[in-house]
Each structure stands twice: as C-alpha cells, then as structure tokens.
Image (cartoon, rainbow, N blue to C red):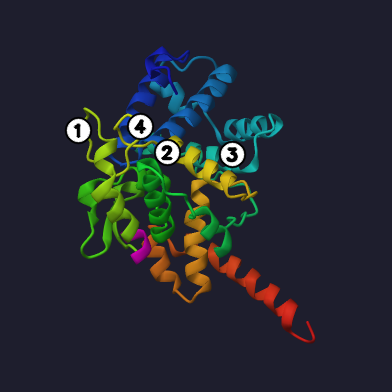
C-alpha cells in the first residue's frame, strides 16, 4: 500500500478507523511490518466493496452497525467470482474477522463476523529439497567476498531453519560464535535461541573474519549480511541469490528461500529429531503447525514400504 491512508477514496469514518486499526496492529498486537501491510490492504479492499454497496461510511455508527454477516458473505462471493485463490480468500477472511473483532472491542458493538465460517482448504504440504539437492545448492564456488557471504547465508539458513526475514535481520549482536548459538526475533517479536551447526559456524566465521569488512561502505550497519552498497541485504536480494545458485547447479525445482526452512525441518524429522524440538527451533507458536512435517515423513515411509516390502 504505497498511498497514505488519508489519501484513499473512502469515507471519513473508514479513514479514521483504518488509522486506529493500523496503530492497534503495530503497537498492541506487535505485528511485523509485512503482516500489518497485508491486514490493512485486505481491509481497504473490503471497505471499498462495502462502501460501494452501502455508500460512504462518514460516521462511525454507520461503519460499525450497518455491515451484517450477509454483507460479509456477499463480499466473499465477490472474491470467489473474481477468481481469487482459496488460500487468498481464507487469508482475507481471517483479516475481516480480526478487523470486526477489533471494532467490537473498540466501539462496543456486535461482532458480525464472529460466526463467519472459514473456507475448507486442503493443506498443501511444503515441498522440500532432497539432501542431495541441498548439497548441490550449498556447493558454491568460492572466489570473492560475495561468494563467501552467500555461502555463509545459505549454510546458516539450512542449519537453523530461519525465516528469510529473520536471516537478513540478524545483527552482529545476535550471534554467539564461541557457544555456537544465535538469538532470533520472530513473529510477534518473540525471541528464540537456535543452535548453529559446525559447518555453518565455520563458514560464518570465515565470512566475518575475512570478508564482511570489504563489503562495508560509508554506512554504519550492524547487520551480518551486507549488500554491494554496504547496507543490510534485503529479502528480495536473498531470493535472487538462491534462485541464481539453484540455476547454476542445475536444480529444476521452483526454489524459494522458504524451501530451505522446510528442508531443515523435514531432514531433522526424518533423522529422528522430536517434533517439540523442531517446533522450538522454527519458532512455531503451535505444535499443530509443525505437525505438517509428519505427513512428509509418512510419505517417505510409504515409499520405502512400497519399494521394499515383499507384499506391498
């Protein structure tokens, strides 16, 4: 959302509530910037639809009392007819439910979205790289500072299962090289401690001792991984790095940074790690989120059974 909220073509009440809601997301729920942007964008589209149906919401009373569950369902049907994916629709429904829950508490009105039923969507299992593919991905030809930086980044992500935003956000103060741990601030600003494997730790030490200083420019930047301007590398920058490396080594899967996180969890589970430990390292709030990886493991078991059991 590039335009300021006050510049949107919405009623006065909608503008006011959006500003207050954005503050609530940032300072009360402590949502990260990307999440705040997604929630606000969803609600802008939602309010535009409702104002098109009911007229501008120029007073709070109209905004908080004139939208019914039928109006919300009508919006959902509009999304369906507009060819939004089921995943996108479900996310927008979550945004709407949170928004109306906020309105209910803020203005002491009935929560008309409370009984909104979530669309049933088949959970898509995350795709993981094989161990052989990971080894190919991490086989970077080391010739310059950027190569050593990329090697340290990819090794660290696979060794820790960090989200890409967590990886690029790491600072020099978040790493304990002597003990082999890092401190990571994840979703909801929750801090967790994650161990670093020996291989990743070795390449991280090499990068920090011999190459990071050559990437520094006039800027004072505490982030570990720097771009060619001496600033913190961005999520988009890392995405380009992993895509190029995959292409260079002949990996044909549609690769993404999140795939390394999935691979980290899947390979740990396949080699005997317990689900609770994986949950803590990934920073999942609920164990049910981590349990999706058990399905991947069950698939591996089934393949082995079918291959090797004489009566499969």
Residue pointed to by mark 2 = 235
Q: What percent of the width, then of the height, locates residue 206?
A: 29, 53
Residue pointed to by mark 1 = 220
Q: What percent of the width, then of the height, locates residue 191?
A: 28, 54
**Residue located at (33% from left, 62% from top):** 196
Give the secondary structure at mark 4: loop
Q: Earlier in the sequence, mark 1 or mark 2?
A: 1
Q: Earlier in the sequence, mark 2 or mark 3?
A: 3
**Residue located at (27% from left, 57% from top):** 182
State the CA–CA distance, disc 4 to disc 3.
35 Å
State the CA–CA distance, disc 1 to disc 2.
20 Å
Q: Quadrant of the C terminus?
A: bottom right
Do callouts 1 and 2 mark residues in contact (Cβ within 8 Å)? no
Residue pointed to by mark 3 = 88
Magenta stretch encompasses residue 198: yes
State the CA–CA distance, disc 2 to disc 3.
22 Å
Number of the front mark, 2 or 4: 4
Q: Earlier in the sequence, mark 4 or mark 3?
A: 3
Number of the front mark, 1 or 3: 1
Give the secondary structure at mark 3: helix
Number of the front mark, 1 or 4: 4
Please give the count of numbered marks on the rendered protein.
Answer: 4
Q: What percent of the width, then of the height, locates residue 216?
A: 25, 35
Residue pointed to by mark 4 = 228
């Amino acid at each position: 959302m590039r335009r300021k909220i006050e510049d949107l073509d919405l009623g006065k009440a909608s503008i006011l509530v959006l500003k207050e809601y954005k503050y609530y997301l940032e300072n009360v729920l402590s949502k990260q910037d990307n999440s705040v942007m997604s929630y606000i964008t969803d609600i802008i589209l939602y309010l535009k639809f409702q104002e098109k149906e009911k007229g501008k919401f120029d007073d709070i009373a109209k905004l908080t009392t004139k939208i019914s569950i039928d109006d919300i369902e009508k919006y959902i049907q509009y999304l369906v007819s507009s060819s939004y994916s089921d995943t996108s629709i479900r996310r927008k429904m979550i945004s709407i439910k949170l928004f109306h829950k906020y309105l209910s508490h803020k203005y002491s009105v009935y929560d008309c979205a409370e009984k909104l039923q979530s669309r049933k969507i088949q959970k898509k299992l995350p795709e993981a790289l094989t161990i052989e593919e990971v080894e190919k991905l991490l086989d970077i030809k080391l010739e310059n500072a950027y190569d050593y930086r990329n090697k340290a980044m990819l090794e660290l992500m696979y060794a820790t299962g960090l989200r890409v935003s967590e990886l690029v956000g790491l600072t020099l103060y978040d790493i304990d090289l002597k003990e082999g741990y890092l401190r990571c601030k994840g979703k909801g600003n929750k801090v967790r401690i994650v161990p670093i494997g020996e291989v990743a730790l070795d390449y991280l030490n090499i990068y920090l001792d011999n190459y990071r200083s050559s990437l520094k420019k006039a800027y004072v930047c505490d982030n570990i991984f720097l771009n060619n301007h001496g600033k913190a590398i961005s999520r988009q920058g890392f995405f380009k790095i992993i895509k190029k490396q995959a292409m260079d080594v002949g990996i044909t899967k549609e690769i993404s940074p999140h795939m390394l996180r999935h691979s980290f969890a899947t390979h740990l589970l396949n080699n005997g790690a317990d689900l609770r430990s994986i949950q803590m390292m990934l920073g999942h709030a609920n164990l049910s989120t981590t349990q999706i990886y058990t399905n991947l493991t069950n698939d591996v078991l089934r393949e082995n059974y079918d291959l090797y059991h004489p009566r499969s």
